[in-house]
Amino acid sequence: MSIKKLTYLFLLLSFSIQAQQETVISGHVSEIGTNSGIPFVNVYFKGTLIGTVTDFDGNYSITTTTPQDSVYISLIGYKSKAKKVQKGKVQEINFQLSQEALNLNTVEIRPGINPALRIIRKAQVNKSKYDREKLTSIQYVSYTKQEADVDNITPKMRRWKLFRPFASMWDSLDVIVGEDSKANLPVMMSEVISDIYSFKEAEKHHEDVNAVKIKFVGMKDGSAVSQLTGTDFQNYNFCNNSVAIQGKDILSPIADNAMLFYNYILVDSVTIDSMKCYKIDCHPKNKKDLAYTGYIWVTDTTFAIKQLDLGITPDVNVNWIDHARIQQVLIPTEAGPWVPSQTRTLVDYTTLTDKFVSMVVRTYNSNQNFVVNKPKEQDFYKSRITYAESALTKDTAWWGENRQEPLTKLESKSYDMIDTVRNIPFIRKGVNILYFLFSGYKDIGPVDFGHYINVYGYNSYEGTRLRLGFRTNQKFSKSWIIRGYGAYGFKDNGFKYNLQLERILTRYPWSKAGIQYRDDIDQIGTNFNYSSNMNLGQSSNNLNTTFSQIGNVSKLVRKQEARIWYEKDFNPGINTKVTFQNIRTNPLFPISFGDQFAIFQTRKYSITEVLIDTRFSVKERFVQNGTERISFGNNKSPIITFSYTLGLKNVFESDFEYHKASISFSNRYRMATLGYSQVFIRAGKVFSKIPYTLLEIPRGNENVFYGNNIFNQMNYFEFVNDQYIEAFWQHHFNGLIFNRIPFIKDYNYREIVGINMVYGTLSQRNKNFNSNNVFTVMDDVPYFEADLGVENILDIIRVDFLYRLTYNDDSYKKQYELSNPGNKINNWGIKVGLQFSF
C-alpha cells in the first residue's frame, strides 16, 4: 500500500473516530404550567466554557467532543435543572422549568461606580435616536400567532365526566409537553398575516389583513376575536417611559426616572448578530412597584436595546395576573430607529383562589420586509383596517407556505382539540353563562334579552318598576338592528316602552342611521342614551346609574321622544352624529314659566331640535362584534367633543326657539410608577330663554354608590345654570404610598385623590322666565368637593371619602332646606363602588 493511500486511510479513520466521539444535544426549554418556550436560557456544562443559550422559541443545540456527565440550564426567576448526558451520541433533552420566588430586596453594594448604571444612562440619553415612533412612516409584513389555554386543571378535574370525550387527545398532548408538565386545555388559537402601514405626521394607522385563521370555543371563526390578534393590540415600545400590560402602565428599565425604582447589575457581555452587547439584570427596588424584572441586552457602541426578557412577578401590585413576560428582539433600520423583528408575550391570569382554573394567553409576533420613511398618500390611511375577500378561507397548504414561524407540534394538536372542546354541551352552557354575566344579555336565537341590571327600579311616582329589554343579533341580520324595552310601574299602573330601528350602512368607515320612539319617565337633567358612541364623559358606573333610578326622586318628567339620526366616522378617530328629534315633556311636579305678562299655565311643553355632535378621539380602538361596535378606550390621546343644539319653534307643535353649545375635553396623563391622572372638563352656554328643566343642571348623587364625572356630594337638581364650566380631576397612585407601609402593602390597596368643581351663572332673562319655580343659582363662588379614596379592596371594591368644600355653611344649608322640604345637605359622605381593573 502506498504512502498516499495510507495517509487517506489514516485521515478517514481519524474523522470516523472523531464523529463517534462527538456528543450532539438538542432540545426545547419550556415553562411548567404555561408550556411556553423560554428564550435566552443558559445551557452549559458546569465547570467548562462549553454552552449556549436557547433561541427565541426556547430551542437549543450543543455539539462537543468533551461533554460532562450532565447538562445544566439556568435563568433568573426559574429553578435551575440538570439532566444526564449520554456521551458520544446524538440525543434530545427537553427541560420544563418551574418559577421560583426572587429575593429582590437585598442587593450587595460594593465600593466604586456600578458599571451597569453608566450603560443605563447612555441608553436613556440615546433612546430618542432609536425610538421607532420617530420614524415618519413605516410599513412591514406582520405575522401574529396567539393561543389561549385554561390552566391549573388538576388530575382530579381531568377525571370529571365533561373531560372524558377528549381524554386520549389530552394524553397525546402530555407526551409532547414533557414528563415534568401537563398539557393545558386550549380554548383559542389564531393566526393573522397583515400588511401594516403607519404615518406619524397624521397619526394614521392602516392594516390590510391578508389571512385570518381562528378557532375559539364558544364563538364562530372570524368573529371579533380576529380583530384583537393583530399588531394593533400588541405594541410594546421600551423607549417609552412606560409599557402597558393589560392597560396597566409598567415602568420601562430605561425610563427617564427608572433609576429611582430599579436596581441594575451588569451580568455579562455577549455577541449577538455580530454586535457586542451588555447583558444587564433589572429588578425593582420595591417588589410591589409597577416595574419589570429580567434582562435587557444593550449594544456597546450605540447603547440601543438589542433584545430583552422582562416580566412582572406575582408580587407586583397588579390584579388578576399571576405573572407576565415580554421577550423581544430588535433590529436597526436604515433610518436609525430600531424596530421589533420578534416579540413574544405571555400573560398567566389568576383567579381569587389557587384551587380554581385560570387562563394563560401566549402571543407571538414576527415582522419583516420593513420600509421606512416612505409614506403613502394620506387618503390611503382613511380606513384603519381592511380584510381581503379570501382572508378567512385560506387552506392549510397556503398557511404552511406563508407562515413566518411554523407551528409547533403542540400548537397543531391544539387546533384539533378546540374542535372537540367546543362541541361539549357543558362547555357551550358555560360560555353562554359567561356571555350573560359580562354582556348583561341572554341570547335566544336571533334576539338578546337584557340588560339584567335595569330589570328593577323604584321611584316615588311609579313605585316598584320592572323592565325587560331586547336587541336583535347577527342571526337576525348583519345590518339591521331592532332594540327596545318595556317597563311597568306598579304604583302608577303605567306602561312605558322604547323601540328603535338601526341600520349599519358601512363598517369601514363606520356609519349608521336610526329611528326611535320612546315613552318613559326620566329625572330632569338626564337624557336617554340612544347611541352610546358619543359618550360625553358622564358616569359609566352601572351601579350609580342604576341606583339613581331607585329612591325618593321627586322631580320626574314623562317624555314622548321621536328621533332620527345619522352618524359616521369621517376619518379614523373623528365621529359626527346628526340628530333630528321631537320631545314632548310632561313634568310630574309643579312648574310654570314665561315672561311677566305671558306665564304658561300648562305643565306640558314640546321641543323640536337639531343636534350636531362631533367627537375627536384619534387613538381610540374599536372592535366590531356582530352588530355592535365595542370601544377599547383611549388612554393615549385626548378626547374632545363638541355639541350644538338648535331648537326650532312651531315645528311639530314645538314651543321654543333656542341655541345651545358645549365642548368637553378628557385625557389620561400616564406617569408609570407614579400612577395616572384622569381629567375631564366641560363648558357650555344656553343662548336663549327656556324652561329651567332644559337648562344645565349639574349631575348630583344622593345614593351610596360612587359615580365618575358627577358631583357625589351635591344633591339632585341643586343648581341651575345657563352658562357653566365643570372640571373633574382624579389621581390614581396605584399603590405608590401603600406599597411602602408594612402590613398594609400585603393587601395591594391603592390610593386616590381628587377634586371636582363647577361654576355656573344664570342670565337675567332666564331668571325672569323661570321666576315662579324654586331652584338655586350659584353666587360668585364655584362649587368644590374633595375626594380621598382607597381602591382595589378585595380587587374590585373602592371606597371614597368626600367633603363638600363650598356651599357648606349653615346659612346656605338652612335656606336650601327651607326651599326644598325633605332634602338635606351633608358636607361629609362615604361612597362605594365596584370596578374591574388590573
Image (cartoon, rainbow, N blue to C red):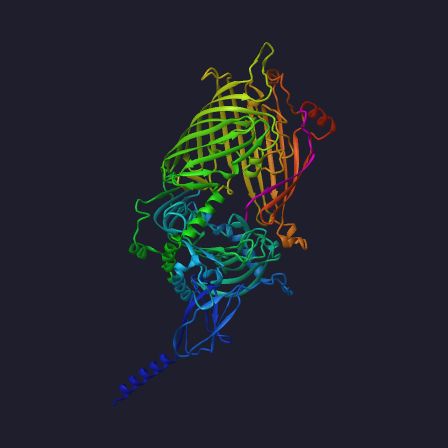
Near-viewer residue (128 or 265) = 265
Does residue 578 appear in this view? Answer: yes
Above or below, 627 relative to 343: above
Q: Residue furthest left?
A: 1
Q: Is residue 664 above or below residue 675?
A: above
What stretch of residues is rendered in magenta?
Answer: 820-838
| Residue 142 visible in image | no
Of the pair 832 and 648, the residue shown nearer to us: 832
Q: Quadrant of residue 665?
A: top right
Measured from the top left, where is residue 184 in percent x and y? Answer: 45, 59
Q: Residue at x 30, y 49 (%)?
A: 393
Q: Main secondary structure of the magenta part?
A: loop
Is residue 821 covered in magenta?
Answer: yes
> In the rendered view, does 776 fall on the left or right side of 83?
right
Q: Position of residue 140 (x, y in %)?
A: 38, 50
Residue farthest bottom in this picture: 1
**Residue 494 is a magenta residue:** no
Residue depicted at 30% across the width and 55% down the height? 396
Q: How many marks?
A: 0
Q: Residue at the spot x=59%, y=25% of the render? A: 555
Report the quarter where the N terminus lies: bottom left
Outermost residue on the right side: it is 810
Residue 752's x, y, as percent? 63, 44
Closer to us: 465 or 783: 465
Q: Is residue 537 above or below residue 188?
A: above
